[in-house]
Image: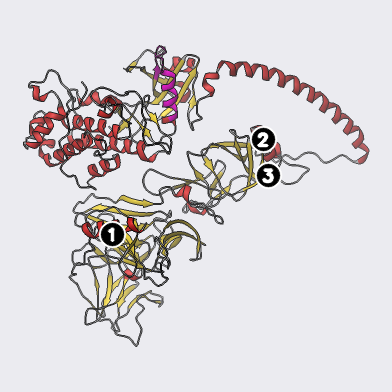
């Protein structure tokens, strides 16, 4: 551990020094003030990048510091988030050198904690670092906002031991929320939930340890330097741990690290000198707060009875189970409540016939079990929950025949693809207020009991006969469908019959495309309001098509990303292996890229970035890592808005969680296959990076990677021709038939070409990951000059 930290520190000192910049002050003299009103004046930093003053929030005003040169006036510090000021309030630097907030009713809040007997402030200043300071005549800071952080950490700011960042209550409510980040006395950086509405800590859900034990008096600090590093040092300046190890230039990007209202600590960047720039997430922790935050006491990230769902981008979202609703629609993290009257605990009228279950896959509420049964059937599990008025959810694990009962309130609810059991949420299925009749008097009991016994015997005999017949029929049906039973259960997929799909495609009449192992037809689902779908029928003559079918259903069914084609359902009936996808109205990328009406330069850039983001999701962000193995223009489809959607996972290699490499026979399409396939070397996700590099060159120049009928032999292989033109600074030769926009943006064209050269390096270890490729396309990571890529296309 010490050796790693030493190496990291050396790297940090060599490449990312903590820079101290001289500040130009715009002094604010004592007696100055600002009035809370529409379009009120502000105290700005010298560059105008930051402003101090009032912002209107709803019916009140918040006294804050914000980024002032971007459309989204993002607040980085606030003084009165818990108690907004009224219109007409003022903030004043008094003649005594104190910063005071005055409300019209006469209430006064002292913001600066300067001692009356101590030195008085001579002026205030809003600095270009985002720090608001009060200083004396010698320009020594007596008070600064950096020492009173709220939810945001800025470059050049430090946090001392005991310093706390509080999350805001919601995205638009800056009062103290439910989470906090704290630097502990031992140097650990810890994310906590709070005992809301108190400020005290409740449960630690993410810790960055400081390393080996040290003396208690080590004066730890968290530093956010101007190169984008966030790290912890001790009193000797020794690097103890790294919070965020990514770098980005503050000359080109605004930066902030914020503990957001959902409990995630995010490092954001925003490009400067761009009127349309927005914040993008550069780093965040924890990676999946829904799974990592499991409180022993408390409701979890979304409150009691709710479900936490991790989105691809932006904050996590909270949902309620069926027949539950948010307690407060304006604050989803307060949790959910039942919309129905709970089950009666009256033994005389247990209401078991008035309740049923809503099955939810990939959903869990840890730490709420109060009874456990094994081995039992799912039906038995349901019945035991129905007979218990305290049971709100039954969890059934079919692989182990386990049954758990959970009661209200439910905590730590989450959606997680790794959950292999079914959550059975008990809900009321009738609105009837029916109650059974009163118990007959003693004189009638005997006769009534005899009648009941006789009726019960008849019912039992009838039930046994029906059950036996049903068993024989069902077992026969299931024996015919044994091939379908070994498919992995996939959430939200519909199992179609062959007859349904034959009718939907009008007898598989309108062909959309044909591949080596399958044909795709256009279909219309009359059962789903005429929804148009793409129906992919695998060829029965292909020996491996059953393997392909299972791989594709397993791989695609568990994915969800805007740059992937969504699988709607499947058919696995007899010899029929069919997949049903959402329909992409604009066809494949190859049809427009190599056709007469070529996409413009902006569209091509968008398609390149969307494809990269889809591959990044497959490689790093979905529950199981997936190598696509066949990235090419024919497998990039375009929706109504020309958004790139990756399709055809039929040759995907699904990896286990702890597996990063696989060895298998060559898969993919010639011209896009990485060199390691031909060398019988282990294949990693870098094979997809190689294919993407070839595809990127085709997108840039709207030309196939190999053209046998090229005017010149040097132009047959696109990568070779592009590299020669790049070295001679003649990339415009490849854009002769392109639109003016691409020629006018030749610097961007060159940047994209260089990224492609990095992707098609012969050595997989030299190729970047898709995360790095995405960041290079987005302008977050600098694009350097690559080595000469070898000509290794297999034609």
Give, as a single range, the part of the protein colored magenta.
536-554
Q: Quick check: 331 above or below 61?
A: above
In the picture, measured across the screen, residue 647 lies left or right of residue 254, that is right
Task: Let me know if residue 605 is in the magenta part.
Answer: no
Secondary element at tag 1: helix
Q: Position of residue 286 (x, y in %)?
A: 41, 51
User: Which quadrant does the N terminus fall into?
Assistant: bottom left
Quadrant for residue 241, please give it.
Answer: bottom left
Q: Residue furthest bottom?
A: 117
Task: Let me know if residue 552 is in the magenta part.
Answer: yes
Badge 2 density bin: few <14, some 14–19, many ≥20, Cα 10 Å: some
Badge 3 density bin: few <14, some 14–19, many ≥20, Cα 10 Å: many
* Contact flag, marks 2 and 3 (Cβ < 8 Å): no
> Residue at (41%, 33%) from the top-left corner?
655
Secondary element at tag 3: loop
User: Which quadrant does the C terminus fall into?
Assistant: top left
Labelled disc at residue 9: 1
In the picture, measured across the screen, residue 393 lies left or right of residue 749, that is right
* Contact flag, marks 1 and 3 (Cβ < 8 Å): no
Residue wearing tag 2: 375
Q: Position of residue 713 (x, y in %)?
A: 9, 22
Quadrant for residue 660, please give it.
Answer: top left
- Say whether residue 151 is visible: yes
The numbered mark, 1 or 2, whose residue comes first in the sequence reads 1
Labelled disc at residue 343: 3
């Amino acid at each position: 551990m010490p050796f790693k930290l030493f190496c990291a520190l050396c790297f940090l000192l060599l490449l990312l020094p903590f820079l101290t910049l001289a500040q130009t002050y715009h002094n604010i003299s004592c007696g100055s003030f600002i009035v809370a009103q529409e379009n009120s004046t502000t105290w700005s930093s010298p560059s105008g990048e930051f402003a101090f003053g009032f912002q209107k929030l709803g019916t009140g005003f918040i006294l804050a510091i914000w980024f002032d040169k971007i459309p989204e006036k993002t607040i980085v510090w606030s003084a009165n988030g818990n108690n907004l000021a009224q219109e007409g309030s003022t903030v004043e630097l008094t003649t005594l050198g104190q910063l005071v907030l005055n409300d019209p009713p006469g209430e006064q809040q002292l913001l600066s904690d300067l001692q009356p007997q101590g030195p008085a402030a001579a002026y205030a200043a809003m600095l270009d670092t985002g720090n608001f300071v009060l200083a004396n005549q010698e320009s020594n800071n007596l008070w600064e906002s950096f020492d009173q952080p709220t939810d945001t950490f800025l470059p050049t700011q430090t946090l001392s031991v005991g310093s706390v960042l509080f999350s805001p209550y919601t995205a638009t409510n800056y009062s103290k929320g439910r989470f906090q980040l704290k630097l502990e006395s031992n140097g650990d950086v810890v994310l906590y939930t709070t005992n809301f509405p108190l400020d005290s800590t409740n449960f630690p859900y993410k810790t960055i340890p400081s390393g080996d034990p040290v003396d208690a008096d080590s004066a730890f600090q968290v530093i956010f330097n101007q190169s984008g590093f966030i790290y912890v040092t001790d009193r000797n300046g020794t690097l103890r741990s790294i919070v965020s190890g990514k770098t980005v230039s503050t000359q080109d990007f605004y930066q902030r690290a914020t503990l957001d209202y959902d409990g995630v600590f995010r490092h954001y960047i925003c490009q400067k000198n761009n009127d349309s720039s927005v914040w993008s997430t550069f780093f965040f922790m924890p990676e999946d707060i829904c799974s990592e935050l499991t409180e022993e006491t408390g409701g979890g990230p979304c409150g009691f009875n709710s479900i936490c769902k991790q989105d691809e981008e932006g904050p996590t979202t909270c949902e309620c189970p069926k027949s539950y609703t948010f307690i407060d629609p304006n604050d989803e993290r307060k949790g959910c409540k039942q919309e129905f009257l709970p089950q009666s605990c009256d033994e005389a009228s247990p209401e078991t016939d008035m309740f049923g279950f809503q099955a939810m896959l990939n959903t869990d509420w840890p730490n709420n079990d109060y009874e456990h049964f094994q081995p039992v059937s799912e039906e038995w599990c349901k019945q035991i929950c129905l007979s218990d008025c305290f049971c709100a959810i039954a969890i059934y694990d079919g692989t182990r025949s386990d049954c758990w009962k959970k009661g209200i309130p439910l905590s730590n609810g989450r959606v997680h693809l790794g959950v292999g059991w079914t959550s059975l949420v008990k809900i009321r299925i009738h609105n009837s207020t029916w109650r059974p009749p009163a118990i007959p008097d003693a004189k009638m009991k005997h006769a009534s009991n005899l009648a009941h016994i006789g009726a019960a015997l008849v019912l039992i005999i009838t039930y046994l006969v029906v059950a036996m017949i049903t068993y024989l029929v069902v077992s026969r049906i299931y024996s015919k469908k044994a091939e379908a039973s070994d498919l992995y259960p996939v959430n939200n997929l519909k199992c179609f019959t062959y007859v349904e799909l034959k009718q939907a495609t009008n007898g598989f009449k309108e062909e959309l495309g044909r591949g080596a192992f399958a044909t795709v037809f256009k279909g219309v689902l009359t059962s789903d309001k005429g929804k148009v779908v793409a129906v992919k029928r695998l060829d029965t003559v292909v020996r491996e098509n059953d393997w392909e079918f299972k791989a594709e259903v397993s791989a695609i069914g568990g994915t969800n990303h805007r740059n992937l084609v969504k699988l709607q359902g499947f058919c696995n009936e007899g010899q029929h292996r069919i997949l049903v996808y959402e329909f992409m109205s604009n066809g494949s990328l190859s049809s427009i890229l190599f056709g007469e009406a070529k996409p413009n330069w902006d569209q091509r850039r968008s398609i390149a970035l969307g494809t990269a983001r889809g591959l990044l999701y497959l490689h790093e962000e979905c529950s199981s890592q997936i190598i696509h193995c066949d990235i090419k223009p024919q497998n990039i489809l375009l929706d109504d808005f020309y958004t790139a959607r990756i399709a055809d996972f039929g040759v995907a290699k699904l990896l286990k969680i702890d597996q990063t490499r696989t060895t298998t026979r060559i898969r993919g399409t010639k011209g896009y296959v990485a060199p390691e396939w031909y060398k019988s070397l282990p294949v990693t996700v870098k094979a997809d990076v190689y294919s993407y590099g070839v595809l990127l060159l085709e997108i840039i120049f709207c030309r196939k990677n190999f053209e046998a009928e090229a005017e010149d032999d040097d132009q047959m292989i696109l990568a070779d021709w592009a590299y020669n033109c790049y070295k001679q600074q003649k990339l415009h030769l490849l854009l002769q038939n392109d639109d003016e926009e691409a020629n006018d943006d030749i610097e961007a064209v060159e940047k994209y070409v260089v990224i492609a050269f990095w992707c098609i390096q012969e050595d997989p270890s030299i190729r970047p990951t898709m995360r790095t490729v995405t960041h290079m396309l987005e302008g977050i990571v600098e694009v350097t000059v690559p080595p000469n890529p070898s000509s290794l296309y297999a034609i």
